[in-house]
Amino acid sequence: MTVRTPSRDPDIINSFKALRRAARAARKLSRETGTPFYVLKDGKVVDLNRAENRAKGRRRSTRSKPPTASAQRAVKPSKQRKKNASA
């Protein structure tokens, strides 16, 4: 049995803390943007955001609603306004 000696390199010592901070920041960003957050859990790839939303009873819409016909039409100024503006 070999005994591991701890590293004296400060980069190695602090790397675990840095990885944990990065994971927390990535999880926060995925919650804010509604994007999946995949992790390996019990040998399976799991989306933690989907599992969290199911537990809370929330559903995320996958599609946005198409714009209405009135929103797609550009509002054009009437001929009367053009005549008044040039006079």
Image: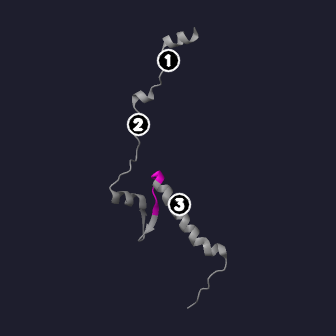
Looking at the image, tell me whether mark 3 or mark 2 is earlier in sequence order: 3
Tell me the element at label 3.
helix
| Position of the N terminus by quadrant | bottom right
Q: Are marks 3 and 2 in contact (CB under 8 Å)?
A: no
Write the residue at 45% across / 67% down: 40
What residue does disc 1 label? 77
As drawn, the residue found furthest toward the bottom would be 1
Looking at the image, tell me whether mark 3 or mark 1 is earlier in sequence order: 3
Query: Compared with residue 15, is residue 58 higher up or lower down, i.e. above or below?
Result: above
Which region is colored magenta? 32-38
The magenta stretch spans residue 16: no
What residue does disc 2 label? 66
Looking at the image, tell me whether mark 2 or mark 1 is earlier in sequence order: 2
| Position of the C terminus by quadrant | top right
| Spatial CA span between label 2 and label 1 | 25 Å
**Kind of residue at badge 1:** Pro
Q: Are marks 2 and 1 in contact (CB under 8 Å)?
A: no
Write the residue at 46% across / 65% down: 39
Task: Indicate which disc residue 25 carries.
Answer: 3
- In the rendering, at what x and y percent does residue 56 appear? 34, 58
| Spatial CA span between label 3 and label 1 | 49 Å
- Using the image as rendered, state which of residue 54 and residue 45 is in the foreground: 54
